[in-house]
Image (cartoon, rainbow, N blue to C red):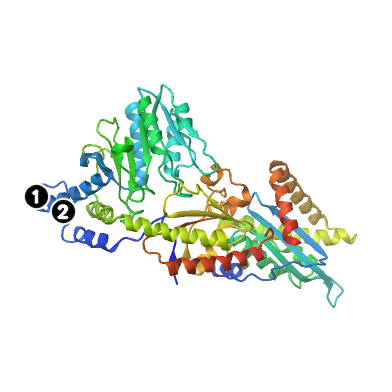
C-alpha cells in the first residue's frame, strides 16, 4: 500500500480542479488581457475564480491579487509594504517560526537598511500578543505573523494580533498557506490588511496563489510591467492555474476538514499510545487539522523517513541530516527542542484522500521501522 | 540522492549489535551533531600469527549515510589484519558504497574514526605499541570530543545517561 502523508508539502490536484483547468490549457487559450473573444473568455473565467476566492475570505474581488504562489505573495507583502512606507518607518515585526520565504525576505530587507524584530515563541510555537504589542515602535510599518505553522501546525492568535496592530496603526500581514479553507478566515472580521494564500496546499495546481491586499493599503508592486491585477502585479495571468485555484476553493468544504482532522487524530492517538519515547511537537489544542509533528527519541529523522519511504509511506522531517546546512529546522530550534528530539523529528500531514485503512497501515509500519532503527541505534 | 548500495546497507545493515566482552570499543560522534557510532571488535590471529579483526559489530544513531557507512566499514574490516583495517580510508568506504552525496561525506569519516578508536582501545588495553599515525588520529578525535563536550556539556551528560540505559 502507498500512503501519502505529506499534504502540508503539497496536495494532489483534485479531479474537479483538473477538469476545470483543461479547457484553459487547450482550446480556451486566450490571453485574459486581449480585447477579442478568446481574451474575453479567459478573462471571464479568471474573474469568476477571483470572485470565489474573494467570497471565501469576505473581501472584495479587487482585493484579490493573483501571484505565482505563497512565496511570491509573501515577498510581495513584505517588500511591497517596506518600499511603500519607508518614509513612515523602517521597522518590521515578525516571529521565529515563520516560513523561510518570510524570514529570508526579512533578512534581505535588513541588509538594505530595514530593522526587523524576530519575536520568540513558547515551547508550543505560540507567539504572545503582548510581545507583539511591546515590540511595536513609532517607526513600525508592518507586523507579519503566520496563521498556522507548516512544520508543527500551531495556530497563532491572529485576531488578537490584528487588533493590536490596528490600535497602533500598523499593517498586519498573515501567511495563511496552511490554514486557508481549513480554518475560518474572514479577513473583514479578523482585521488583516494582507493575507497570503496558496493553491497547491488545497488540492489546486502549483504555481499560483494570491495576496489579499485590503483597500487603502499602501503597497509597492513586486512585479512591474503591463499593469495587470489592478496595477499591483504585472504579468500575463496564469489563467488555467487561477481557474484551478478558484475551483479548489469552491469545492473545499467542512466535511473535508472534518475528515482530515479525524485521520490526523487517529494517527496521533495510535502513535502516542503505541510507540514508546515519542513526543508531540506543537500546541496540543491550537493546531491546524492536518499536521502532526513527532520526535522519536533515539533515532534520526532522515533515516526514519527513508525507511518509511521504502515501504511506500511519504512524510517529511526537520532533522539536521536532511537539510542542506546540517542544522535542524529553525522551527524546531525556536520551540527549544533538545538535540535528541530535534534530530528524531517527523512531520505527518493528512489529507482528503487518506482512509482509515491507510492510517492504520502507516502506523503499523511506523512501529516496525522505529523498532528496527532503535535496534541499530547507539542511544535507544 | 542515495545509491542502491547505500540503500542496501541502510535497509539491511550488516553486523548490527554489541559484543559483550569486546577486545576494543570505539565511540565517536555526539547527539548534538546527530550522529553517533559505536564499534566493537574481537581480535584474533590468522595463520601467519598476525592480529586480525575476528568479529566486529556496530550501533549507530544517525541518518541513512551514517547507518550505511557503519555497516559498510564493518563489512570491509572483518577478517582484515589490524594494519589493513587502519588503512581503510573514508574514500574507500564512500567508493565501496558507490559514492555519497558530498554533504554526507563526513559520515564516512565518522565510520573510519570509530574503527580506529576501537583498534586504539584494544592496543592500549593490552599495552601493545600504538602506531604513530593512529596516536595522532586518536588525539584529533579526543580533541573534537572535548570541544563538543565543552560546547554542549549538558547535552553530552544526558546522552551518556541514555547510553547507559541503552546498554544495560
Disc 2: which residue: A30
Q: Are marks 2 and 1 in contact (CB under 8 Å)?
A: yes
Q: In what quadrant of the picture does the C terminus of chain A appear?
A: bottom right
**Label 1's element?**
loop
Any part of residue B98 in sight: no
- Label 2 – label 1 distance at C-alpha: 9 Å
Q: What element carries label 2?
A: loop
> Which chain's residue wears label 2?
A
A226 vs A310, left or right, is left
Q: Position of residue A165 (x, y in %)?
A: 38, 29
Label 2 Cα neighbours within 10 Å, binned few <14 / some 14-19 / many ≥20: many
- Residue drawn at point x = 79 percent, y = 65 percent: B83
Direction right: furthest residue: B127
Q: Where is residue B82 in the image (x, y as percent from the top left)?
A: 80, 66
Which residue position is annotated with label 1? A36
* A79 relative position to A364: left or right: left
Amino acid at each position: 500500500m502507498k500512503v501519502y502523508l505529506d499534504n502540508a508539502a503539497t496536495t494532489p490536484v483534485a479531479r474537479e480542479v483538473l477538469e476545470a483547468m483543461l479547457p484553459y490549457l487547450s482550446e480556451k487559450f486566450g490571453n485574459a488581457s486581449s480585447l477579442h473573444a478568446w481574451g474575453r473568455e479567459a478573462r471571464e473565467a479568471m474573474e469568476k475564480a477571483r470572485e470565489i476566492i474573494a467570497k471565501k475570505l469576505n473581501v472584495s474581488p479587487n482585493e484579490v491579487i493573483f501571484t505565482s504562489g505563497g512565496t511570491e505573495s509573501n515577498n510581495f507583502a513584505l517588500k511591497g509594504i517596506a518600499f511603500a512606507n519607508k518614509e513612515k518607518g523602517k521597522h518590521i515585526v515578525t516571529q521565529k517560526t515563520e516560513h523561510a520565504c518570510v524570514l529570508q525576505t526579512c533578512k534581505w530587507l535588513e541588509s538594505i537598511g530595514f530593522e526587523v524584530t524576530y519575536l520568540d515563541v513558547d515551547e508550543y510555537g505560540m507567539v504572545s500578543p503582548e510581545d507583539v504589542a511591546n515590540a511595536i515602535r513609532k517607526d513600525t510599518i508592518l507586523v507579519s505573523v503566520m496563521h498556522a505553522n507548516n512544520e508543527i501546525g500551531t495556530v497563532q492568535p491572529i485576531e488578537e494580533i490584528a487588533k493590536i496592530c490596528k490600535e497602533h496603526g500598523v499593517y498586519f500581514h498573515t501567511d495563511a498557506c496552511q490554514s486557508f479553507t481549513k480554518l475560518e478566515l474572514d479577513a473583514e472580521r479578523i482585521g488583516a490588511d494582507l493575507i497570503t494564500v496558496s493553491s497547491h496546499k488545497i488540492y489546486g495546481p502549483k504555481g499560483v496563489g494570491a495576496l489579499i491586499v485590503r483597500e487603502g493599503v499602501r503597497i509597492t508592486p513586486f512585479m512591474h510591467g503591463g499593469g495587470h491585477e489592478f496595477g499591483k502585479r504585472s504579468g500575463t495571468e496564469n489563467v488555467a492555474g487561477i481557474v484551478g485555484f478558484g475551483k479548489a476553493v469552491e469545492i473545499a468544504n467542512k466535511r473535508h476538514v472534518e475528515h482530515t482532522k479525524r485521520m490526523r487524530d487517529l494517527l496521533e492517538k495510535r502513535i502516542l499510545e503505541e510507540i514508546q519515547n515519542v513526543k508531540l511537537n506543537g500546541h496540543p489544542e491550537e493546531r491546524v487539522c492536518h499536521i502532526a509533528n513527532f520526535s522519536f527519541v533515539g533515532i534520526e529523522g532522515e533515516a526514519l523517513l527513508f525507511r518509511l519511504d521504502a515501504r511506500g509511506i511519504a512524510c517529511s522531517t526537520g532533522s539536521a541530516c536532511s537539510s542542506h546546512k546540517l542544522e535542524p529546522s529553525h522551527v524546531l530550534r525556536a520551540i527549544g527542542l533538545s538535540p535528541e528530539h530535534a534530530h528524531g523529528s517527523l512531520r505527518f500531514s493528512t489529507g482528503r484522500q487518506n482512509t482509515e485503512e491507510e492510517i492504520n497501515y502507516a502506523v503499523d509500519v511506523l512501529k516496525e521501522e522505529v523498532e528496527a532503527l532503535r535496534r541499530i541505534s547507539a542511544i535507544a | 540522492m542515495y545509491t542502491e548500495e547505500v540503500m542496501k546497507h541502510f535497509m539491511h545493515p550488516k553486523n548490527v549489535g554489541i559484543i559483550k566482552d569486546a577486545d576494543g570499543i570505539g565511540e565517536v560522534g555526539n547527539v548534538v551533531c546527530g550522529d553517533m557510532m559505536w564499534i566493537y571488535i574481537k581480535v584474533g590471529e590468522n595463520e601467519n600469527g598476525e592480529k586480525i579483526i575476528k568479529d566486529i559489530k556496530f550501533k549507530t544513531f544517525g541518518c541513512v549515510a551514517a547507518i550505511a557507512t557503519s555497516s559498510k566499514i564493518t563489512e570491509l574490516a572483518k577478517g582484515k589484519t589490524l594494519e589493513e583495517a587502519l588503512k581503510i580510508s573514508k574514500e574507500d568506504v564512500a567508493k565501496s558504497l558507490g559514492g555519497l552525496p558530498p554533504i554526507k561525506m563526513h559520515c564516512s569519516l565518522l565510520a573510519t574514526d570509530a574503527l580506529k578508536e576501537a583498534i586504539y582501545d584494544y592496543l592500549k588495553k593490552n599495552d601493545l605499541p600504538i602506531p604513530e599515525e593512529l596516536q595522532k588520529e586518536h588525539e584529533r578525535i579526543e580533541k573534537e570530543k572535548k570541544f563538543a563536550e565543552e560546547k554542549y556539556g549538558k547535552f553530552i551528560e544526558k546522552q551518556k545517561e541514555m547510553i547507559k540505559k541503552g546498554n544495560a
